[in-house]
Image: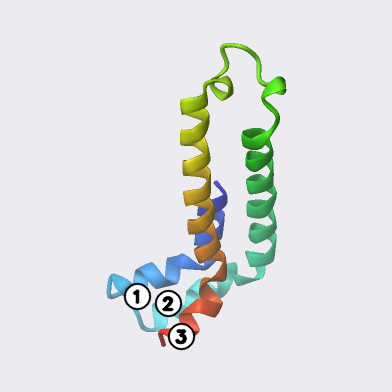
Amino acid sequence: MAALGAAVCCAGPLILLLLGISGAWISHLTVVEPARPFLITIALILFLKAGWSLYRPKARCEAGNSCSLPSRRRLYQIIFWLLAAVASLLITSPWLLVWFY
């Protein structure tokens, strides 16, 4: 959900440009720009909540729950950091894309 929220205003225009869709139609995508800070805040809050539930002490995990299994917990941690990296790229894309255009 956090990555999708960040992608609405950041990666959407880039993907459209990569697909060859450009011109005056892309200029209408600035409608979601005012919501960008709100969406980034929601994304960060959701990532903080996910990180807390993933890295909380094992004593808070109930026996038989998926967070108590070490292999499953490690897989969730890897997925969390991969998605955090993708979301970070999407959030910072307006500043990073300046280097490519």
Q: State whether residue 50 is above or below residue 8.
A: above
Dots 1, 2 in contact, CB < 8 A? yes
| Rendered image quadrant of residue 64 | top right
Type of amino acid under label 3: Trp
Q: Viewed as shown, does residue 13 lie left or right of 54?
A: left
State which quarter of the image contains the C terminus: bottom left
N-term mark: 2 or 3:
2
| Rendered image quadrant of residue 66 | top right
Q: Nearer the viewer, mark 2 or mark 3?
A: 3
**Mark 2 — residue?**
26
Label 3 sits on a secondary structure element that is helix
Q: Position of residue 37 (x, y in %)?
A: 68, 65
N-term mark: 1 or 2:
1
Q: Nearer the viewer, mark 3 or mark 1?
A: 3
**Mark 1 — residue?**
17
Q: Nearer the viewer, residue 11 or 35?
A: 11
Q: Position of residue 65 (x, y in %)?
A: 57, 17
Q: Nearer the viewer, mark 1 or mark 2?
A: 1
| Rendered image quadrant of residue 63 | top right
Disc number at residue 8? none
Q: Residue furthest left?
A: 20
Q: State whether residue 101 is above or below residue 71.
A: below
Q: Nearer the viewer, residue 15 or 68?
A: 68
Q: Position of residue 22 (x, y in %)?
A: 34, 79
**Mark 3 — residue?**
99
Check disc 1: other Cα within 10 Å, few if <14, some if 14-19, many if 20+: few
Residue displayed at 49% across by 72% down = 29
Q: Viewed as shown, does residue 20 lie left or right of 4?
A: left
